[in-house]
Amino acid sequence: MLDDTLKSQLKTYLERLVQPIELVAALDDGDASRELDALLREIAALSDKITLRRDDSDPRKPSFAIGRVGTDIGVRFAGLPLGHEFSSLVLALLQVGGHPPRVEPELIEQVRALDGEYLFETYYSLSCQNCPDVVQALNTMSVLNPRIRHVAIDGARFQDEVEARGVMAVPSVFLNGEPFGQGRMDLAQILARLDTGATARAAAKIAAKAPFDVLVVGGGPAGAAAAIYAARKGIRTGVAAERFGGQVLDTLGIENFISVRHTEGPKLASALEQHVRDHDVDVMNLQRAVGLVPAGEDGLIEVKLESGASLKSRSVILATGARWRQMNVPGEEQYRNRGVAYCPHCDGPLFKGKRVAVIGGGNSGVEAAIDLAGIVSHVTLIEFDGKLRADAVLQRKLRSLPNVSVLVNAQTTEVLGDGQRVTGLRYRDRASGQEHEVALEGIFVQIGLLPNTEWLKGTLELTPRGEIVIDERGQTSLPGVFAAGDATTVPYKQIVIAMGAGATAALAAFDHLIRSSAPAAEPAEAVAA
């Protein structure tokens, strides 16, 4: 199962095991069980602290548990955690074996303080780049608190279970048998949902903070670059981010980031956050901005947060990024995550052998159709314009596939369903005006991005598309407020461009500060010292 290089790397990792662990396999006579048995035998042979036994009592086969010998601490995987989930397997082995997780101390205490019994079940796909974050967070929680149990389930392997539970998007998490959440969640986000007092405590802590010199709103590539450049100037810098990494977290392969031949969105997002935290930056995650108040007589700009708290700063850099654009047709919201999806890499495996549509004829849409054609029975690509806008090489590949149909001049008008899931869509032929219906089970929307700027309307200048108007220095229409990245009028929404724009905005903000009033007050703890 594992090549020699991977075995060597894994053996090195397993030297960090502190306590003995046991692998307990539940198998049947299928090929997948034979593959899992071979994988577990290879892992057990790499460390004298690992033992392996078989117990077929678990109804999910193939599956296996990783348990700390003599304790109730452990995690379970149903299926073979390879692909994106191999890292989850390695971390689970280490953490169950006593290697401490890389988690902030306050979050560790928060997990250990949770009362009650929790059984989490997470459905993932091996091609989903967001799933490992959820799987690893819940595995960590189950290691820290024995009252928490977690099973990570390969949705493509357990199709009957997926169908019965209506899982049509990954990651999908169930808690004690009931739906808990869908989409990427990190440990702090999960805890915020379980610990109802966490939001209020965080808001109180934020409200007590002293003003910043530079406050960055947003934690994507533009926000991270801005924070690093500002902090390196030695000024008081803060970052308020709804989710650190932003849209990058939803990106699979990245092959045009200069000097890095290939990386993946979550890996880059993690590296961005670590680089920011290496500097003297106050990172406030899970904070959604809802209001911007221009500077008053005190010279401080105020950013209001959804939690009710506010932050003040002598300058602000807006780097709120963008999100997937929706079709805004009847049925889309009703069937979101019940057949309507926005990430073909994540959710594509759940539609194996089914009929799907891809909305959008640009590069993203055509690439999605090509990828899905290898999984599903048939793909219908629907483009509003009279021709596809994707690169010629992609169009040639698309048209060579036997199970792909292309419709141009087609306006999607409605998502159809049976109340539980998608059954088709309705579109209008823009040339003839005739209405048509297509029977299918899934719709993947790939029609571009929408800037996250609704909360800024009426405060500063926006284009009709909602983009923040900036000059060559990143300056907005408000003095002391700068902006960078996909939320702005900068052309070409690319990671490398957003990073450069973030650096530009930070340097411009610093230039603004040295020409304005005295530095912001020192933090309260520094004054007390």
Image (cartoon, helix red, strand yellow):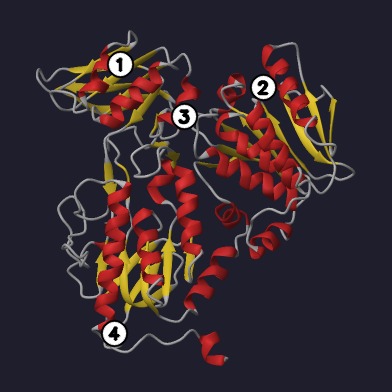
Name the residue type under label 2. Answer: Met
Give me the C-alpha separation between circle 3 and circle 4. Answer: 48 Å
Sequence-wise first label, 2 or 1:
2
Give me the C-alpha separation between circle 2 and circle 1. Answer: 42 Å
Quadrant for the N terminus, please: top right
Which is more foreground, mark 4 or mark 2? 2
**Rendered view: 288 above or below 477:** above
Give me the C-alpha separation between circle 1 and circle 4. Answer: 58 Å
Sequence-wise first label, 1 or 3:
3
| Secondary structure found at label 1 | strand
**Residue corresponding to mark 1:** 438
Quadrant for the C terminus, please: bottom right
**Left or right: 361 with respect to 106?**
left
Label 3: how many Cα within 10 Å (few below 14, some 14–19, many 20+): many
**Residue corresponding to mark 3:** 347
Q: Residue 314, percent across and down?
A: 32, 79
Tell me the tag on residue 299: 4
Which is more foreground, mark 1 or mark 4? 4
